[in-house]
């Protein structure tokens, strides 16, 4: 029948198209929800990443994707390799032109530190923005995994996260069940600032068996008065300051001998890069905090025996 070849042709064409479709690998977008509740979609793992906070820079390197970072903000000083990268201003005042000039295919931002207006401008330029906001130690491990995926090193991010979780579990097993110690964490002196129970540092306290005396305050990093600290009467004061040296204002609490922490000599310093940066090194700071709280427990016990 003369019509048969013409009837078969569309069938053959359909089969050929189907074979091509099944043979060709389908493109799978990388889709991840960030900590601001926004969905971030990348056509492929990022090759040019700009970090808008020092701790984000550190986490990117820890996740094994530091070779993808092409720009950072001021004070991105760890690991040492980060110091050589081009800077795009500070975390609170980024240089939009400098970011655009680096042609990033991903910007990693800090919800509590970067201005929303700047992030909106980046989004308007068509640059994907992933917003990070760790509030618990487990979130640091999760960030390592996510950053590994975003930068195309899922295995490296997972390995770093597993190592973090293992160390955290060891600290928790050793300290979490020990008697609670009422603790005041001091960020700064003037104004006198602390953290509430939603802050990552408060989770460090819980890991060590500490009780944040200002956990109930609504602000993440509230300002308090000296009178409020005296009324809370913490058994331990932990301070960080701004540098590697113990801040002079930490010892000013000795002016109030009725304060339990001052009377017992429980005034401790932790370098800010080990406690105020949401990175794997926060467990180094946590180990120090745990040791300080144990010292306070020992002094408590010694006082009870006298």
Image (spheres, helix red, strand yellow):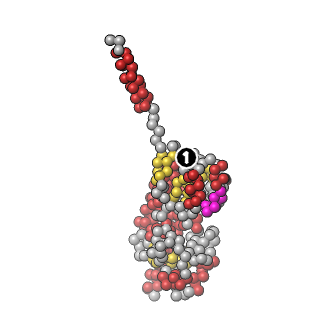
Question: Picture coordinates of residue 112 (x, y %)?
Answer: 54, 64
Question: Picture coordinates of residue 67 (x, y %)?
Answer: 59, 48
Q: Residue at coordinates 58% horizontally, 84% vertically from top-left? A: 254
Can residue 111 be seen from the camera position used here?
yes
State the extent of the magenta-drawn residues as a range: 89-95
Nearer to me, 41 or 153: 41
Q: Residue at coordinates 61% horizontally, 77% vertically from top-left? A: 190
Q: Residue at coordinates 59% horizontally, 50% vertically from top-left? A: 125
- Does dot 1 land on a helix, a strand or a loop? loop
Q: Residue at coordinates 43% horizontally, 31% vertically from top-left? A: 21
Residue bearing the label numbered 1 = 46
In this view, the residue farthest toward the top is 1
- Crowding around mark 1 (Cα neighbors within 10 Å: few <14, some 14 to 19, many 20+) is many
**In the picture, residue 108 is in which quadrant?**
bottom right
Count numbered badges in the picture: 1
Q: State yes or no: residue 106 in magenta.
A: no
């Amino acid at each position: 029948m003369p019509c048969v070849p013409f009837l078969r042709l569309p069938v053959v064409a359909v089969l050929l198209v189907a074979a091509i479709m099944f043979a060709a690998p389908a493109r799978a977008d990388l889709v991840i929800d960030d900590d601001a509740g926004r969905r971030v979609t990348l056509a492929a793992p990022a090759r040019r990443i700009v970090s808008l906070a020092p701790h984000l820079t550190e986490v990117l390197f820890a996740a094994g994707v530091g070779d993808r970072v092409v720009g950072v903000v001021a004070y991105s000083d760890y690991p040492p390799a980060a110091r050589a990268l081009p800077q795009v201003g500070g975390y609170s005042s980024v240089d939009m032109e400098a970011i655009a000039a680096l042609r990033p295919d991903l910007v990693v931002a800090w919800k509590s530190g970067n201005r929303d207006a700047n992030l909106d401008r980046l989004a308007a330029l068509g640059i994907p923005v992933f917003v990070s906001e760790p509030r618990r130690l487990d979130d640091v491990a999760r960030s390592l995994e996510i950053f590994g995926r975003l930068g195309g090193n899922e295995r490296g991010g997972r390995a770093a996260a597993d190592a973090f979780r293992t160390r955290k579990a060891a600290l928790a097993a050793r300290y979490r069940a020990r008697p609670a110690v009422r603790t005041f964490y001091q960020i700064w002196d003037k104004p006198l600032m602390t953290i509430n129970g939603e802050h990552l540092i408060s989770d460090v306290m819980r890991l060590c068996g500490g009780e944040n005396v200002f956990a109930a305050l609504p602000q993440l990093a509230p300002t308090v008065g000296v009178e409020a600290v005296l009324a809370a009467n913490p058994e331990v004061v932990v301070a960080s300051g701004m540098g590697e040296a113990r801040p002079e204002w930490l010892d000013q609490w000795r002016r109030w001998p009725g304060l339990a922490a001052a009377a017992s000599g429980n005034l401790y310093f932790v370098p800010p890069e080990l406690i105020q940066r949401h990175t794997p090194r926060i467990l180094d700071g946590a180990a120090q905090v745990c040791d300080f709280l144990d010292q306070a427990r020992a002094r408590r016990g010694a006082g009870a025996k006298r």
